[in-house]
Image: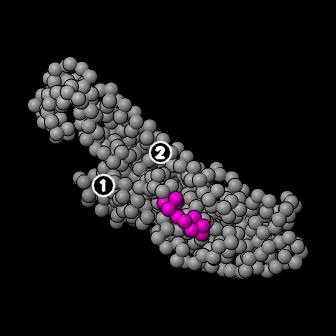
Amino acid sequence: MKLLIVDDGHYVVEYMKHLVDWRSFGIHQIETTTNSIEAREMLNGSLIDILITDIRMPEVSGIDLLHHIHQNNLPTKVIILSGYSEFDYAQQGIRLGALDYLLKPVDKDDVEHAMSKAIQKIQKSRPVHSANWEHFNGMGYLLSLLTQNETLKEEYDVYAACLADHRYCFFKLEHYTEADVERVQQTVAESSTSFVWPSGSHLVACIPEETARRFAAQWNQVALSSPFALTNRNETREHFYRFFLNENVSSGDFVGLTALSSVESDSETIGNIIHTYERIANRKQKQIFLMEIITYIYLKDKNQDTTKIADWMFNRLQDPDKFGPILIDMFSRIRINKQMSIQTIVDKVRKYIEDHLSHGLSLDELGKVAHLHPVYFSKLFKQETGENVSNYISRKRLEKASQLLQDSELRIADIAQMIGYRKIQYFIQLFKQEYGVTPYQYRRNMTHQ
């Protein structure tokens, strides 16, 4: 799906672009603009599934964009951004068909809630006959059944009616040739051509039962699973794990499993993921957990070779103890790379703070360093570090003071000035709150030690 973010403030657009993991909502293309006239042309030029727009903008307002969508019968779902003083204006937007409005400064949880509402609306309004097999991805559909990812499930629900026409079998052919691949793809039904994957030394497929039986009669080296309904999640899981991974699973094996790829999972640190995996003693549960990580990688890195993903799913998961550390390392790299843009901003400001402790260090000053509005920077810093900017500055100043008290003979008044405190009594008060003693007592204790 495609998302368009429109606001005449560049910092708002940048903040919104990095606020949540849009891919977890099935958003694979994000367009942004600070020009509302350009936004109207973008709505005309290509299908925009969801529009997030400021309600007040010069020349063309968010209300104008809503009118445009309504008059041209566009399917775009709209979420509007507004300030407290624009409540009546926001209500007008709701009457014109906006799904939700978010008050500035925008909160991450509110955005995720509004997006969930928009995605549900899109899925409910999308008719079965709109299934576009040209864009169908068999790997994505299979993963939507094998894992807990609700976003993938909703994305592929539109195809379920067509896939319900047959019962399917998992198929495996050893030592295949390119001619074999072409033969299988040409023989299976159109809806099943995406379910054929080269995987290591095997050709793997999920094909209609009648076609599978015919292949089994023609090729001695073909192995088939029992037939199942591909649209039945539990049945598909049972046959997949039994046929490819030699494990018997039931619906209870998936209860309570964290769907890593269905949410941003910022709360799930890399260390937590490793710790969770290491606590799993059961081979089957390791395979199920690693399948969630494969889905995460599939969604986050669309450039991954599907042949490689197929090899992971159908072959390498057979030995989770050997493959698990390799897969978790890939997961870690993606998480680290994803965080780099925001982390770079935070690290840049941290260094600026430590180099300029004698400055006033207002949010306005730090916002300029980050090239973000101070309010948005403050929320971003707290989201990324778990600590308020003001608390971080105070902590760094007092750490610097403690170092100077130990390593120099500077007067306490001079130290207070050097770390940005103009009133010595206020500095002494803060220092005692942090270290339990006054600066003078701290220096004396350090000297005696």
- Point out which mark residue 204 bears: none
Upstream in the sequence, badge 2 or badge 1? 1
Is residue 349 placed above or below 121 in the rendered structure? above
Residue 98 lies left or right of residue 199; in this view the side is left
The crowd level at tag 2 (other Cα within 10 Å; few <14, some 14-19, many 20+) is some
**In the rendered image, is residue 402 in sight?**
yes
Identify residue for label 2: 339
Identify residue for label 1: 103
Q: Is residue 94 magenta?
A: no
Asked whether the beta carbons under mark 2 and mark 1 sit within 8 Å of each other, the answer is no
Is residue 206 placed above or below 3 in the rendered structure? below
Front-most of residues 73 and 326: 326
Q: Which x, y percent locates residue 170?
A: 73, 73
Gap between marks 2 and 1 measured at Cα: 26 Å
Please identify the dominant SS of the magenta region. helix
Front-most of residues 133 and 298: 298
Q: Can you tell which quarter of the image residue 359 is in?
A: top left
Query: In the rendered view of the protein, which quadrant contains the C terminus?
Result: top left
Q: Which x, y percent locates residue 75?
A: 50, 63
Task: List the single residue furthest toward the left.
Answer: 425
**Residue at the image point whose x is 85% and y is 62% from the top:** 175
**Residue at the image point whose x is 23% and y is 53% from the top:** 85
Residue 418 lies left or right of residue 265; in this view the side is left
Residue 330 lies left or right of residue 18; in this view the side is right
The crowd level at tag 1 (other Cα within 10 Å; few <14, some 14-19, many 20+) is some
Q: Nearer the viewer, mark 2 or mark 1?
A: 2
Q: Which x, y percent locates residue 189?
A: 76, 73
Q: Which residue range is magenta in the image?
A: 276-286
Q: Which x, y percent locates residue 48?
A: 52, 56
